[in-house]
Image (tube, rainbow, N blue to C red):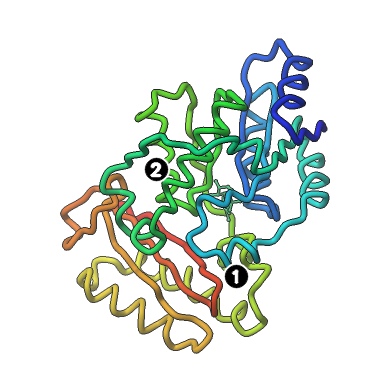
Amino acid sequence: MHICKSINSLNKVLDSLRPYKNAGFVPTMGALHEGHLKLVEHARKENDIVICSIFVNPTQFNNPKDLEKYPRMPEKDALLLEKENCDIAFIPSSKEIYPEKDRTNYDFGEIENVMEGKFRPGHFKGVGMVVKRLFEIVKPDNAYFGLKDYQQYLVIKKLVNQFNLNVNVIGCPTVREKDGLAMSSRNLRLSEEQRKAAPIIFESLKYIKNHFSSKSIPGWKEWFKSQINRFPALDVEYIEIADAETLMPVKNSNESKNIVVCTAVFAGEIRLIDNILLKC
Ligand code: AMP
């Protein structure tokens, strides 16, 4: 596997691998786990060459403490990527990605004002900025994103439309721990008590999915908060029940064909997000 720390070296390696039919790309912020590696595996099956980037993107963090504490372990990550037969690990510096201020106007419509967008102002502009830049550098045919970050996945599809980027965006299912907790690099920072409590998030989402018709939407939102708040280690930031395409909140289950339930829960200062799709 090639490790490239600059755009120059990436371009040289890409040239040495030509001709290739298609290139698959997995953008990440590192501290890789099974969720990321499944994306690489998926890309490996569908592409001649696979590139994975590791870049902790400062423009998408609205909380400086979260950015500072974000786990970084590029050497270990490179070993994991090599095992997955990734061809290139692209590990650029901030200077490579942002040589100058990006003055592009990103507009994702209403979708960036709800849920993650509402509670993390500016977050999706930062995501848009880095993904657009990475797409321009790597020039992939296919790019793989986890549905764990469901709103992000929709934002990336909007980004590709807004700028007419020639990339297929492929969403991959959320990979979970045995007890249901969605894998996340931030899970490494959970205390024992927080880690023990955290599976209630997905358990409650699954319960809503399986019993959806038995309560009203406001009723489910209240129920979810009361379930989570039984655990002193956890605190609900939001729970939304929304149309799975527009992410606009729904008041009634018959308002939408596909509904998604999305949540963010704090475990101390660590923010855990998860979601579940309902077919109505
Ligand atoms: P991150 O490193 O957190 O920015 O994530 C990089 C990519 O991996 C994004 O497309 C995420 O949605 C995806 N991802 C992170 N965790 C999971 C998971 N548990 N299951 C599936 N995809 C994931």
191 with respect to 251 (left or right):
right
Q: Is residue 258 visible?
A: no
Residue placed most toward the observer, 13 or 214: 13
Q: Amino acid at mark 1?
A: Asp
Residue placed most toward the observer, 98 or 180: 98
Q: Amino acid at mark 2?
A: Val
- Please give the residue where the numbered disc 1 appears in the rendered image: 179
Q: Position of residue 262 (x, y in %)?
A: 38, 61
On the image, which quarter does residue 109 sit in? top left
What residue sits 74% from the left and 15% below the top? Answer: 15
Return the residue found at the far top: 19
Q: Position of residue 26 (x, y in %)?
A: 61, 38
Q: CA distance from mark 2 to mark 1?
A: 29 Å
Q: Is residue 29 visible?
A: yes
User: Mark 2 vs mark 1: which is more N-terminal?
Assistant: 2
Q: Does 13 appear above or below 258?
A: above
- Please give the residue where the numbered disc 2 appears in the rendered image: 155
Q: Does 193 appear above or below 38?
A: below
123 with respect to 240 (left or right):
right
Residue placed most toward the observer, 279 or 112: 112
Label count reads 2
Q: Residues within 10 Å of mark 2 (few under 14, many from 20)?
A: many
